């Protein structure tokens, strides 16, 4: 008989510990899925083997035994090591980390090929001859795969420089070596484009796809193919980093700078950190690719933690697009109140007449930002969150973009009865309406979270644009993420200031990245493209650097700012948010946490605890929210980690039913 420590599949903080069971069943290993009787009511529960426990000094009274083993849904061999690491790093329950690996749904009634599942038209193509820069990059990476040596590479290549070809060569080497590979993309909308490239190189057989838009049956089917060792290659969005592959040779993260790689749901993991952990456990390479790498990745490369590979030229040798800044303050002063500057109108008309395509980028969905009464000043707000609701004209509704609540727009002001209830601000839905009025002969599509809701709709929009059936594509950041269309002659960035006005220290970095990435959609064919940046802040250093393609200058200036304030990459930033039904209770609760934290880490570290203060979104879903931020400098992580765990356990014990507690390490949003 063996004593086995188990992780019980029970979503309660009170049961987030290991439970010892007896077992006389053979073949149990860390990650094995089993069935047990749990708690005083002997409820049947699933559980996962964590480890073999040391035999106790004396007999355990009432010891229960493992009853069944489900060998089909065990975690991969590195699963438990990653689970333990995630619990320590992200302050999550073990079972929440386990469920990142576990399959969703149940076996489908019928199976289908990936080509059928994704309706992809692709024929095998011969690999192109790599450029000298691509060849140097490939030759730097492949020896590590052959030696089974862990290494992290930062592939910094300008837009359209051929990073994907390097990814394909890396994966081909893994397959030839009998190893496996994971290819991550930042958006589900990009998976079809990526899969098509893989089908053209490898055919459809050795490939599985994982992302959240699959049905539960489809997701289980893909997971099972991977688990059974039927496919060596997995392509997918963030969650694919947990694919149950064995013998991983490479993990590739395309567009590694994207915020979508950071989970905002429990567990609040960073995909790149998880990928790094799995790659280390498998002696695999991790390749991070981007035209605009994150500040953290550039800093790690500078420090020698990552090996940097640079691609300075576009694959087809066409120059980068020309960039022009339009000062919208002057447009307004000279009587143009349209969202389209006069120069954007002129160049759009010119490109359309030449048979080219145009992209308009605005990182705000909906029709208008808010509804307000011009008579009394009333603003239509969400009752649960206390913030203004966004007007969606197609649905004739006001929508809260934080809790999802929807309301019919009243015909008159609820406060004073006036009919002067008007919408203000501009979103992509309004841009589409204005574009149809301004360019009536053009075919127009819109790609944002509203139009991409229905399964397959994003693929259809992109397919139409790729075939030239659409002349103008209007979109949010979805259109800035790695899309490759060769007939785009002009990109118009309608309001480059939006991301600068968010309460987030990463705002300049996000602005620089969005402008650069959006600009990169232009001129990917045989002729150079053009980019127009419309802004009310033309002098801002992020906009100036992006317009001049000055990556190094922006990095140096932003790095110095981060160094001065002690923010990442010079620290780990930990955000603790407490939510309570009463505002005073929330304020008192977060003050108590700050006091406990300061007592545990010492008064000399008090300046590193920022706050407490109300969260920027002070009320969400009927809960009042207060926060503190912690700057943990190198060498201090364990001190703060242990203190936070003690406080978390104390809060759970005393107030678990009254408070919500969110802990986020290096968050990508502070609202």
Image (spheres, rainbow, N blue to C red):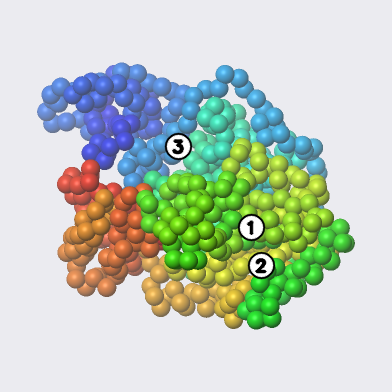
Query: How packed is label 2: few (under 14 Cα within 10 Å), some, or many (20 or more)?
Result: some
Placement of the N terminus among the 4 image quadrants: top left
Of residues 629 and 418, which is closer to you in this image? 418
Placement of the C terminus among the 4 image quadrants: bottom left
Q: Label 1 vs label 2: CA separation?
A: 10 Å
- Residue picked out by circle 2: 339
Of residues 166 and 38, which is closer to you in this image? 38
Q: Which mark is residue 430?
A: 1
In the picture shown, does residue 572 fall above or below 275? below
Secondary structure beneath dot 1 equals helix
- Res 179 quadrant in image: top right
In the picture shown, does residue 9 fall above or below 594? above
**Which numbered disc flags the more N-terminal residue, 3 or 2?**
3
**Which numbered disc flags the more N-terminal residue, 1 or 3?**
3
Whether residue 53 appears in this view of the structure is no
- Res 552 quadrant in image: bottom right
Query: How packed is label 3: few (under 14 Cα within 10 Å), some, or many (20 or more)?
Result: many
State left or right for residue 169 relative to residue 556. right
- Residue picked out by circle 3: 101
State left or right for residue 193 relative to residue 12. right
Task: Give the residue displayed 39% in from the left and 45% down from the top.
Answer: 266
Q: Label 3 vs label 2: CA separation?
A: 46 Å
């Amino acid at each position: 008989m063996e004593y086995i420590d188990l992780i019980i599949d029970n979503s309660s903080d009170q049961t987030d510990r290991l439970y010892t069971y007896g077992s006389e069943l053979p073949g149990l290993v860390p990650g094995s899925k089993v069935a047990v009787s749990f708690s005083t009511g002997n409820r049947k529960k699933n559980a996962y083997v964590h480890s073999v426990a040391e035999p106790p000094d004396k007999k355990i009274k009432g010891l229960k035994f493992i009853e069944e083993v489900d060998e089909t849904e065990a975690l991969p061999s590195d699963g438990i090591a990653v689970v333990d690491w995630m619990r320590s790093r992200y302050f999550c329950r073990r079972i929440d980390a386990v469920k990142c690996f576990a399959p969703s749904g149940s076996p489908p009634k019928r199976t289908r090929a990936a080509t059928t599942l994704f309706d992809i038209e692709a024929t095998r193509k011969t690999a192109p001859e790599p450029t000298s820069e691509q060849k140097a990059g490939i030759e730097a990476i492949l020896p590590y795969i052959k030696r089974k040596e862990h290494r992290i590479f930062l592939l910094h290549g300008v837009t359209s420089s051929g990073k994907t070809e390097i990814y394909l060569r890396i994966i081909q080497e893994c397959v030839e070596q009998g190893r496996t590979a994971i290819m991550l993309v930042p958006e589900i909308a990009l998976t079809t484009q990526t899969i098509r490239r893989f089908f053209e190189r490898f055919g459809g057989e050795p490939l599985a796809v994982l992302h959240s838009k699959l049905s539960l049956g489809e997701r289980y089917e893909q997971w099972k193919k991977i688990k059974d060792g039927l496919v060596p290659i997995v392509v997918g969005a963030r969650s694919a980093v947990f694919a149950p592959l064995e013998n991983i040779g490479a993990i590739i993260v395309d567009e590694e700078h994207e915020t979508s790689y950071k989970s905002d749901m429990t567990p609040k993991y960073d995909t790149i950190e998880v990928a790094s952990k799995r790659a280390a456990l498998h002696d695999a390479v991790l390749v991070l690719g981007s035209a605009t790498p994150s500040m953290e990745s550039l800093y790690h490369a500078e420090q020698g933690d990552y090996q940097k590979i640079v691609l300075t030229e576009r694959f087809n040798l066409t120059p980068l697009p020309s960039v022009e800044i339009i000062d919208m303050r002057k447009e307004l002063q000279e009587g143009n109140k349209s969202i389209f500057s006069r120069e954007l109108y002129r160049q759009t008309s010119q490109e359309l007449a030449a048979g080219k395509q145009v992209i308009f980028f605005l990182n705000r969905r909906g029709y208008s930002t808010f509804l307000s009464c011009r008579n009394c000043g009333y603003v239509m707000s969400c009752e649960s969150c206390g913030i203004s609701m966004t007007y969606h004209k197609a649905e004739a509704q006001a929508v809260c973009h934080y809790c999802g609540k929807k309301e019919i727009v009243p015909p008159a002001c609820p406060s004073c009865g006036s009919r002067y209830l008007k919408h203000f601000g501009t979103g992509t839905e309004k841009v589409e309406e204005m574009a149809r009025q301004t360019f009536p002969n053009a075919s127009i599509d819109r790609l944002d979270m509203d139009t991409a809701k229905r399964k397959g709709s994003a693929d259809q929009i992109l397919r139409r644009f790729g075939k030239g059936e659409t002349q103008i594509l209007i979109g949010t950041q979805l259109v800035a993420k790695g899309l490759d269309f060769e007939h785009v002659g002009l990109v118009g960035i309608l309001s480059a200031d939006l991301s600068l006005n968010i309460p987030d220290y990463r705002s300049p970095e996000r602005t620089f990245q969005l402008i650069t990435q959006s600009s990169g959609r232009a001129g990917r064919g045989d002729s150079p493209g053009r980019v127009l940046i419309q802004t009310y802040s033309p002098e801002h250093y992020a906009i100036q650097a992006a317009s001049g393609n000055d990556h190094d200058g922006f990095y140096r200036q932003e790095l110095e700012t981060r160094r001065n304030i002690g923010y990442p990459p010079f620290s780990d930033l930990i955000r603790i948010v407490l939510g309570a039904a009463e505002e005073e209770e929330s304020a008192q609760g977060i003050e108590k946490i700050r006091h406990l934290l300061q007592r545990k880490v010492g008064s000399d570290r008090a300046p590193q605890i920022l706050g407490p203060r109300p969260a920027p979104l002070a009320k969400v879903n009927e809960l009042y929210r207060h926060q503190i931020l912690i700057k943990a400098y190198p060498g201090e992580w364990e001190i703060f980690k242990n203190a936070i765990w003690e406080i978390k356990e104390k809060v759970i014990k005393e107030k678990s039913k009254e408070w919500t507690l969110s802990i986020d390490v290096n968050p990508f949003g502070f609202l």
